[in-house]
Image: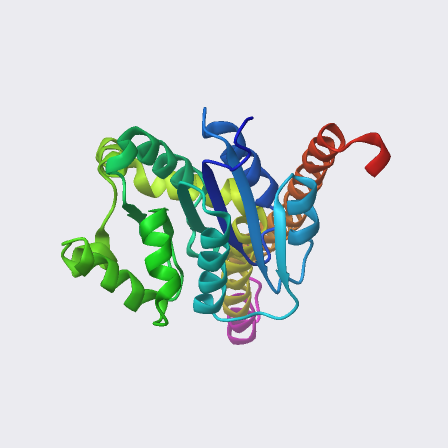
């Protein structure tokens, strides 16, 4: 009889990630192979449709109605990992700007190491309280489940038990594969981060750019008005630049709203199609 226990259990910590959660789930499910993969999303009090889209994309969902501290959600994820007993557990914190690529990379390394695998960690891109992306074997999961400390203290304890220098583990420990990839693209790292922001958060990128340009336009407009009062004559170059900047800022902000809405729609359509393919007709 086939063992129905999933070999890899990916636990995603999410908050207001409706724009990217479906693509994250799809990438984790499709790119980690040939291992059996299960995905559980811990929705930390989102005010958008993160839970609905996650469920439609094929993930199990644990939803909190109100937002909790990261340590609370992390502890719940660890207890869930202990309950399922998967050989490899990956905890992915989207709030720290970690991505599905981090989870896929750690899963591939864990599978390649086999019985020698214990812990791998990719630090978060931002936030002192975010978890980052961490891959754990069963022994490490059991150890974490017994601890009561905060997330950072837990990682320090793991570092000591594994004989790893704690500062390196917390501050900049990255897997060998991740370091190789970063070395190859280090010159283009700012461009890669910019592209990720444009692709994953069009509202933040275009809206933010539009707001900055609008503030510049306002400053330019105040200069034009001040010049008019002093000289009783309109300075046409600055007036033209002000109008042009206002138009550009408005275009960028509208484009950000539209692109963000389109991305959400695409995510929902993809999630709905996946749900329709995977759900028996009698359960729809």
State the image coordinates of residue 163 (x, y, percent, origin top left). 14, 54
**Left or right of 239: which side holds 147?**
left
State the image coordinates of residue 70 (x, y, percent, origin top left). 46, 66
- The image quarter containing residue 187 is top left
Q: Quadrant of the N terminus?
A: top right
Q: Which residue occupies the extreme right position in the image?
A: 282
The residue at the point 45 percent across, 38 percent down is 8
Seen from the viewer's position, the closer of residues 140 and 268 is 140
Seen from the viewer's position, the closer of residues 106 and 149 is 149
Find the magenta span and give its range: 224-236
Q: Quadrant of the C terminus?
A: top right
Seen from the viewer's position, the closer of residues 20 and 244 is 20
The residue at the point 39 percent across, 41 percent down is 88
Residue 177 visible in the shown view: yes
Residue 125 visible in the shown view: no
**Left or right of 132: which side holds 15?**
right
The residue at the point 66 percent across, 53 percent down is 51
Q: Indicate whether residue 235 is drawn in magenta.
A: yes
Total labels drawn: 0
State the image coordinates of residue 269 (x, y, percent, origin top left). 72, 35
Secondary structure mostly seen in magenta is helix
């Amino acid at each position: 009889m086939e063992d129905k226990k999933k070999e890899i259990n990916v636990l995603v910590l999410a908050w207001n990630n409706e724009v990217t959660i479906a693509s994250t789930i799809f990438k984790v499910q499709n790119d980690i192979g040939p291992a059996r993969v299960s995905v559980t999303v811990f929705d930390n009090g989102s005010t958008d449709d993160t839970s609905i889209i996650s469920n439609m994309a094929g993930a199990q969902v644990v939803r909190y109605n109100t937002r909790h501290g990261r340590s609370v959600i992390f502890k719940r994820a660890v207890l869930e990992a202990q309950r399922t007993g998967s050989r490899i557990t990956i905890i992915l914190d989207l709030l720290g700007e970690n991505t599905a690529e981090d989870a896929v990379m750690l899963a591939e390394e864990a599978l390649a190491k086999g019985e020698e695998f214990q812990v791998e960690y990719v630090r978060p891109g931002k936030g002192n309280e975010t978890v980052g992306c961490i891959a754990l074997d069963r022994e490490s999961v059991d150890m974490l489940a017994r601890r009561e400390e905060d997330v950072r203290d837990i990682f320090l304890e793991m570092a000591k038990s594994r004989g790893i220098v704690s500062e390196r583990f917390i501050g900049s420990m990255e897997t060998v594969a991740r370091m190789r990839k970063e070395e190859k693209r280090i010159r283009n790292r700012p461009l890669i981060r910019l592209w990720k922001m444009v692709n994953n958060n069009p509202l933040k990128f275009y809206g933010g750019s539009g707001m900055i340009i609008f503030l510049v336009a306002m400053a330019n407009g105040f200069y034009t008005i001040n010049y008019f009062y002093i000289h009783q004559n309109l300075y046409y170059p600055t007036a033209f630049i002000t109008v042009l900047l206002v138009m550009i800022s408005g275009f960028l902000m509208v484009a950000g709203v539209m692109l963000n809405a389109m991305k959400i729609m695409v995510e929902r359509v993809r999630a709905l199609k996946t749900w329709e393919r995977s759900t028996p007709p009698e359960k729809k």
